Amino acid sequence: MSPTPVVLHDLRLVDGTGAPPVPDAVLVVDGSLVRWCGPARRLPDDPDLRDARRVGLGGRTVCPGFIDAHVHFALPGPAESPLTGLGELASYRTLKVLERLRTTLHNGVTTARDLMGIDAGFRQAVAERRIAGPRLLVAVSMLSQTAGHADFRLPSGIDALETAVAFPGSPPGVVDTVDALRTRVRTLIALGADCVKLAASGGVTSPHDQPEWLGLRPEMVRAAVEEAEAHGGLPVAVHAIGEPGIAAAVRAGVRSIEHGYALTDELRAEMAERGQFLVPTLLETMAEPDPARVSPAVHAKAVRWHRVAQEAFARSVASGVRVAMGTDSGLTAPHGRNLRELGLLARIGGMTPLQAIRAGTADAAELCGVAEVTGSLTAGKAADLVVCGIDPLTDLDALGDPANIHAVLKEGRLAVDRAGVFDGSGLPDLIP
C-alpha cells in the first residue's frame, strides 16, 4: 500500500455514473481506494494532502476501470482453434489463461465475469496478487440439457467442451431434470461460483442445436433461479438467442440475458419493467468463425444470427432495456480488445459515449454485484482507473486500441504504464 496519498491532477474525469465530464479534475488515490475526486477548485484543504505526492496527467481523460460481464478466459479467441486444447495438458492450458488475464487487464478491463471455463482458484490467485488479471467473478460451468448449448459430445465419444475448456474438478454442464439441475447449481455454489450460467436456447457454436430452439425448459430455469436466490441471491445469467429461450429466461426472473438477439418488443418491455440486463456481446458478432476451423453448419448459423443481433440491438436500447458491456471474448473475439465493444454500443445501438461508458462501468458493476466496490470513480471505491491517450467522448472506438490505454491502475496499484505517466509517483506495482 502506498504510504501517503497520491494526488492526480491536470486530468479530465469521466466518472462512470453518466455525469458530464469534469474538465479540470483531481483524483486522490489513498492506498487501494479513491479518497476524493472532483473539480480541482473544490479539492478540500486537507492537511494530509499538503505533503502528498502530486502527479500531473497532461490533460488526459481518466475513466473507471472497465468491466466485461461476459468473457471466457479458457477459450483462445481467433488466435487458435479451441480444439487445440484436446492435445494439451491442463497445466499448459492454465498458463495460457494467465497470459489472457494479464492482457485483458493491461488493456483496460479491471473486473471480468467469466461465464464458463475457469474456476474459483483463478479468482483467488488474482485477489491475492499472485497473478495479474482483472478482479474475477466466475460461473465455473454453463448448464444445458442433452443436445443443448453445453453439450459438445462428439460422435467420436470425445467431449470437446470438457477436454478443451473445463479444468479438473469442474462439474459437467449437461443436466436433464429439475432435481438434477437443483443439485448441480448447489454443487457450483459449493465450488465458489459467483453466478449461475444457463443456456435457455441453442447456440451458434454448439454442434447439436439451433439458436431458435428452446434450451433448458422454463421449469428448469425457474428452479435454477430459485436455488440461486436461496443461496445468497446469486445472479443467474442466461445464454438466450432465439425468442423461445429469451422468453423462458425473462419470465423466470433471471438477472441477465446474454446475447438476446431475437428479442421482441413485448419481451423488451418485460425486461425493462423487471430491470433485467441485456449483455449484447456485439464484439463477438463482428467476425465470422473461420470456415476452415468450423463446420459449414456452424458457419451458416454465425452469418445469420450475427446479422440478426446487429439489426435488433438499437431497438433494445430505445426500449429502455438496461445494457451492460460484455464481449464473449475467447470465441471469435480476441482477448485484450474488449473495449472495442464500447464503440459498437454507440455505433450500432445509438448509445451516447457517456451511456456506453456507463454500460461498461457502473451498470456492469450493478449487474455483477460489485457496485459497492467498483464501477465508478467515487470516494470510497476501489482505485480502479484507466488513463486514456485519446478523448473517448469523441473517439470511443479508439479505446479498443491498446496503444490508447496509457495506464491502468487496479486498487491503487500500477498494472501497466505504457506512457510513463506515473514515473516517480511512488505508486506500487500490482505484482511486486
Image (cartoon, rainbow, N blue to C red):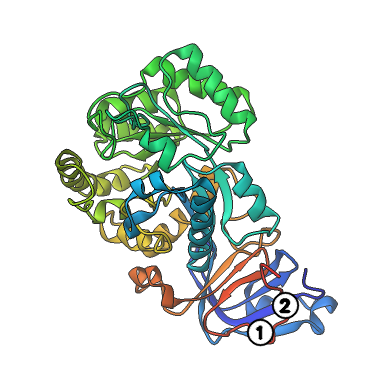
Q: Is residue 227 left or right of residue 148?
A: right
The residue located at (66%, 84%) in the rendering is 55
Identify whether 415 is placed above or below 89: below
Residue 337, percent across and down? 39, 63
The residue located at (77%, 72%) in the rendering is 2
Q: Residues within 10 Å of mark 2 (few under 14, many from 20)?
A: many
Q: Which residue is mark 2?
A: 6
Front-most of 93 and 361?
Answer: 93
Name the kind of residue labelled 2 in the image.
Answer: Val
Front-most of 74 and 408?
Answer: 74
Name the kind of residue labelled 1 in the image.
Answer: Val
The reply to whether discs 2 and 1 touch (Cβ–Cβ < 8 Å) is: yes
Residue 38, percent across and down? 62, 71
Q: Is residue 420 left or right of residue 75?
A: right
- Which quadrant would residue 26 be assigned to in this image? bottom right
Q: Split into 4 quadrants, where in the image is the C terminus?
A: bottom right
SS at mark 1?
strand
Tell me if residue 280 can be seen: no
Identify whether 297 is placed above or below 215: below
* Residue at the farthest right position: 47
SS at mark 2?
strand
The residue located at (80%, 76%) in the rendering is 4
Q: Is residue 179 left or right of residue 33?
A: left
Q: CA distance from mark 2 to mark 1?
A: 7 Å
Identify whether 169 is placed above or below 1: above
Front-most of 381 and 181?
Answer: 181
Sequence order check, earlier mark of 2 and 1: 2
The residue located at (52%, 29%) in the rendering is 171
Residue 85, percent across and down? 40, 47
Residue 370, percent across and down? 60, 47
Q: Which residue is mark 1?
A: 55
- Residue 291 badge: none
